[in-house]
Amino acid sequence: MDAGNADMTLAFELTALKALAHPHAAVTDAREWTAYIGVVSEEPTYVVTNYTRQERIRQDFFSGPRGVEESLESVKDQFNTERYVFVGTNEEDASLAESVGWEYLAVADAADAAGWELAEGEDEEEWIDEDVREDWP
């Protein structure tokens, strides 16, 4: 990544963050060259909160009860930076980023550029299942 461009807002889609072997280390590293970092998802708020708490990830913003599209639009209105980059995992994420005026970066490309390691041996369904709470109303 461009270590000299701290005027950037970086949003991870939750699934993209979970695709990293060491998400806490990746976010900590990204704080060196970004102004704001957050996690967005279509998942319920508690799923994002539980995951980021478990991984000790400090976020400047999250999607809350809004969906990803509305969250990215709101973040762009609230955080004034030169660049807005959305890290995702699929074509749907890429299309969404384009529709709200964010740059899109696939998590594999972000990991390669930043020197982050991707998780191995897990698939998306496993990531989602680990966050489901049976005791949640």
Image: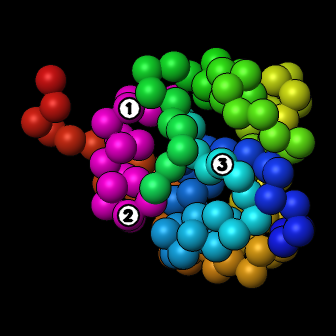
Examine the structure image and report whether residue 47 is included in the region drawn in magenta.
Answer: yes
In this view, the mark in front (2 or 3): 3
- What whole-number distance in Å separates the C-alpha atoms at marks 2 and 3? 16 Å
The amino acid sitting under disc 1 is Thr
Can residue 89 be seen in this snapshot? no
Q: What number is the disc on residue 36?
A: 3
Give the colour scheme of this rendering. Answer: rainbow
* 2 or 1: tag closer to the N-terminus: 1
Q: Say left or right for 25 vs 95.
A: left
Q: What number is the disc on residue 45?
A: 1
The correct choice, above or below, for 89 with respect to 93 in the image is below
- What whole-number distance in Å separates the C-alpha atoms at marks 2 and 1? 16 Å
Q: In terms of depth relative to the viewer, which is nearer, 6 or 108?
A: 6
Examine the structure image and report whether residue 107 is included in the region drawn in magenta.
Answer: no
The amino acid sitting under disc 2 is Arg
The quarter holding residue 104 reads top right
- What whole-number distance in Å separates the C-alpha atoms at marks 3 and 1? 19 Å
Q: What number is the disc on residue 56?
A: 2
Percent of width and height locating residue 58? 46, 55
Q: Are marks 3 and 1 in contact (CB under 8 Å)?
A: no
Percent of width and height locating residue 53? 33, 55
Q: Residue at image x 36%, y 44%? A: 49
Q: Residues within 10 Å of mark 3 (few under 14, many from 20)?
A: many
The amino acid sitting under disc 3 is Tyr
Q: Quadrant of the N terminus?
A: bottom right
| Residue numbers of the magenta segment | 42-57
